[in-house]
Image (cartoon, helix red, strand yellow):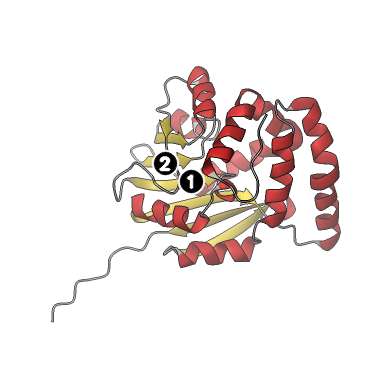
Amino acid sequence: MSRASLEKDPRDVAAMFDDVAGRYDVTNDVLSLGQDRLWRRAVVAACDARPGQRVLDIAAGTGTSSEPFADDGVDVVPADFSLGMLRVGHRRRSDLGFTAADAMHLPFADDSFDVVTMSFGLRNVADPDAALREFLRVTKPGGRLVVCEFSTPKNAAFRTVYTNYLMRALPPVARKVSSNPESYVYLAESIRAWPDQRGLAGQVADAGWEGVQWRDLSGGIVALHRATKPRPGPVVEG
């Protein structure tokens, strides 16, 4: 069984997710105490996608995050760079157009999507800034970005409890329910090394997005960041 390091070599990360694909959704539900379902609903609401619009769900894994869009008549493209995840997803929902894609080098044309969303994937990308620029490239002017990612609880006492859960309780629980418990040691380490809400907002803005906002979910365990791709300004003739 493999696990990635915080260097996040794409081959190691992909191999790690290949290993956990079969039990990924069940494990997440257990480890999050069912909160992952609430987070998915919050992402769908923040995307505010309508029938006729096109959504890129990058790091879609087995497609659980894409299903609500498809069920609402939205044209959603579930994409991931773990072939194991895509295979499991295709077995679950063969009607979804699962696509192999690297977040840093997306195989889509400029201005292709009304919304780009990524849930719990940006933290695993070797160069998040490059990924955020790629998301900007493939989004239509005026289109939206929604990133759901683990973050930093603001309440000090709750933050201590949460950190203890990550580093002490999560690995033993993962050993009981996951097909690759070591990958969840990486999960805890990568969450602790990830920037807080304001830090990620700065990265999103630096990549060229405007109107960056965030909302804490579950006391700040997770943060939902939203932003918009700028529209071209008027052409000024000299």
**Residue linked to disc 1:** 117
- Determine the residue positioned at 40% across, 28% down: 97
Q: Is residue 9 above or below residue 208?
A: above
In the image, 154 versus 4, the foreground residue is 4
Whole-number angstrom distance, CA of label 2 to CA of label 1? 6 Å
Residue visible at 41% across and 64% down?
208
| Residue to which mark 2 is pinned | 56
How far from the left and from the top, in percent, is residue 213?
54, 62
Determine the residue positioned at 60% across, 44% down: 120
Q: Is residue 26 left or right of residue 143?
A: right
Q: In this rendering, is residue 132 above or below 75?
A: below
Q: Is residue 180 above or below residue 158?
A: above
Q: Secondary structure at mark 2?
A: strand
Q: Would residue 34 be seen by someone viewing this image from the given angle?
A: no
User: Would residue 90 be found to the left or right of residue 238 on screen?
Assistant: right
Direction from residue 138 to residue 69 in the image, left or right:
right
Residue at disc 1, secondary structure: strand
User: Picture coordinates of residue 118 (x, y %)?
Assistant: 52, 45
Residue type at the position of mark 2: Leu
Residue 96 in sight: yes
Mark 2 in CB contact with mark 1 (< 8 angstroms) = yes
Residue 69 x %, y % = 46, 34
